[in-house]
Image: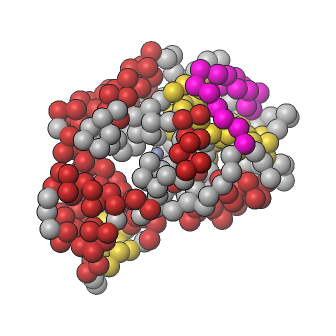
Amino acid sequence: MSRKPPLPPQIHVFVRDWLSSNNVVLKSGDGHVVIDSGYVGHAPLTLALLATPQGLGDASLAKLVNTHCHSDHMGGNAAIKERYGCPIALPEGEAPVIDAWEQQTLLLEYADQRADRFRYDEILQPGASYVWGDLEWRALAAPGHDMGALVFYNPEHRILVSGDALWENGYGLVMPPEIDPRALPATRATIEMLGRLDVKTVIPGHGEPFSDVGAALERAASRTTAFEADSLRAARHALKVVLSFALLDRRRLALAELPDYMAKVGIYRDFNARFFRLAPRELAAWLIGELERAGVAKCEDGWLMAA
Ligand SMILES: [Zn+2]
């Protein structure tokens, strides 16, 4: 049984799911801050959660911050900015990617994901400190899953807002070396950096906040070792994650159309050409089997459905 670790009263975490990242609310008399905005398809739900008393209630929002700019973390940026008129602050490394609205790095169309385009107002520097919710947060570069990602560390309460750099069980998908040679070494270095921090509680991008940080770091390190030993494993993992996400987004995918989908959507097409060299029909059949075995999907009446 995992017990919810206590957090300072001005922090509230809306624990979401795998389509939308968690939303972290940091309250202060000087203005409230929210970290990460969820997926675009969930934007109405995100706005509704933020309007509850645990969130902002009737108050205004002083700033929206992103840990990194994948669609499940920034997809609600435009909706939140429109509702609250607040500035958006994002990591320095993400700014050029957002400027160019780069489909491949952002895993948007390239991975069949969506987001509403938005304008940002402030750039967060790795190594700098920020005061949000009356607490000091050190922004630390946490490249790997996303090369521009930041995590935010509060030394007073030893809290780490980790985004997708560290979850209780793993971390966000990492590109194999053949696709991005920087990603796995950066993941390794980020895990080591996090291991040197004195962390009591992690608020991850997905899943409940947790306190057994040592065990989570060990799992992250051994996953990294496995990926380093076999980049095919990283490639398989990435495709499974991306298809699971698409299934959550679309609820169901027509089985008959999946081979076409594999041939058309960039990440499947590129990974298949690079790693698997299967007919699109074979790639689809293998992925369907993997998702069924993992218990995240089932086949019914010609559809692949989220389980
Ligand atoms: Zn991510």
Q: Is residue 213 above or below residue 232?
A: above
Give the image quarter of residue 241.
Answer: bottom left
Give the image quarter of residue 42.
Answer: bottom right
Q: Position of residue 150 (x, y in %)?
A: 54, 32
Q: Nearer the viewer, residue 254 or 106?
A: 106
At 36% from the left and 57% from the top, the residue drawn is 242
In this view of the protein, can residue 54 be seen by the observer?
no
In the drawing, does residue 72 fall left or right of residue 188? right
Q: Nearer the viewer, residue 152 or 54?
A: 152
At 74% from the left and 32% from the top, the residue drawn is 133
In the drawing, does residue 283 fall left or right of residue 12? left
Which residue range is magenta in the image? 121-137
Q: Position of residue 146 (x, y in %)?
A: 44, 39
Split into 4 quadrants, where in the image is the C terminus?
bottom left
Q: Indicate whether residue 278 is drawn in magenta.
A: no
Split into 4 quadrants, where in the image is the N terminus?
top left
In the drawing, does residue 124 fall left or right of residue 223? right
Q: Nearer the viewer, residue 169 or 252?
A: 252
Q: Is residue 53 above or below residue 286?
A: above
**Which colour assignment does the render follow?**
secondary structure
